[in-house]
């Protein structure tokens, strides 16, 4: 079944669009195929795949100086849980915070905002 869709992509500008920076998801939508079919087509044409785009622009900027319960956000730095605990698959966002007692720690952003940390 996928072979039919790969044949459909021959003669299109898909490779040029990919080289110009379009993601596999964007190309899948443009050419009415799945992103996986786009990936297969690119690999069959010996095109090296880029790392997936990260959605950093959608992340909330830490509100420096804002206090949530006993924790105050002290830095604009953001870490993923996998950076806090190497080897884990934790994808939660962490902010650098300071407790009212003076302790500085990386706290999970959603829990800090809820006042649960």
Image (tube, grey):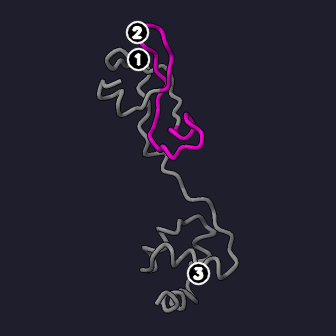
Q: Residue at x 61, y 67 (%)?
A: 20
Work out which quarter of the rendered image holds the C terminus and state it: top left
Q: Which mark's residue is nearer the viewer, 2 or 1?
A: 2
> Which residue bears the numbered disc 3?
41
Q: Which mark's residue is nearer the viewer, 3 or 2?
A: 2
Q: Residues within 10 Å of mark 1 (few under 14, many from 20)?
A: many
Q: Residue 111 occupies which quadrant of the picture?
A: top left
> Compared with residue 34, is residue 66 higher up or lower down, i.e. above or below?
above
Distance (Cα) linking label 2 and label 1: 8 Å
Q: Secondary structure at mark 3?
A: helix
Q: Residue at x 57, y 80 (%)?
A: 13
> Compared with residue 19, is residue 58 higher up or lower down, i.e. above or below?
above
Whether the residues at callouts 2 and 1 have beta carbons within 8 Å, the answer is yes
- Would you say 19 lies left or right of 103 here? right
Q: Which residues are magenta?
A: 80-106
Distance (Cα) linking label 1 and label 3: 49 Å
Q: Residues within 10 Å of mark 2 (few under 14, many from 20)?
A: few
Q: Residue 92 occupies which quadrant of the picture?
A: top left
Q: Secondary structure at mark 2?
A: loop
Q: Secondary structure at mark 1?
A: strand
Distance (Cα) linking label 3 and label 2: 56 Å
Q: Nearer the viewer, residue 23 or 70?
A: 70
**Image location (x, y in percent) of residue 85:** 55, 36
Sequence order check, earlier mark of 1 and 3: 3
Q: What label sits on residue 100 in the rendered view?
A: 2
> Which residue bears the numbered disc 1?
72
Whether the residues at callouts 3 and 2 have beta carbons within 8 Å, the answer is no
**Image location (x, y in percent) of residue 113:** 33, 28
- Would you say 51 lies left or right of 89 here? right
């Amino acid at each position: 079944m996928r072979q039919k869709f790969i044949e459909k992509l021959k003669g299109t500008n898909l490779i040029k669009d990919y080289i110009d920076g379009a993601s596999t998801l964007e190309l899948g939508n443009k050419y009415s195929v799945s992103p996986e079919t786009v990936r297969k087509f690119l690999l069959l044409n010996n095109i090296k795949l880029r790392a997936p785009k990260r959605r950093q622009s959608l992340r909330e900027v830490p509100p420096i100086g804002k206090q949530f319960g006993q924790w105050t956000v002290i830095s604009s730095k953001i870490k993923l849980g996998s950076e806090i605990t190497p080897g884990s698959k934790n994808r939660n966002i962490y902010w650098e915070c300071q407790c009212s007692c003076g302790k500085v720690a990386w706290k999970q952003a959603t829990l800090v905002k809820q006042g649960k940390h």
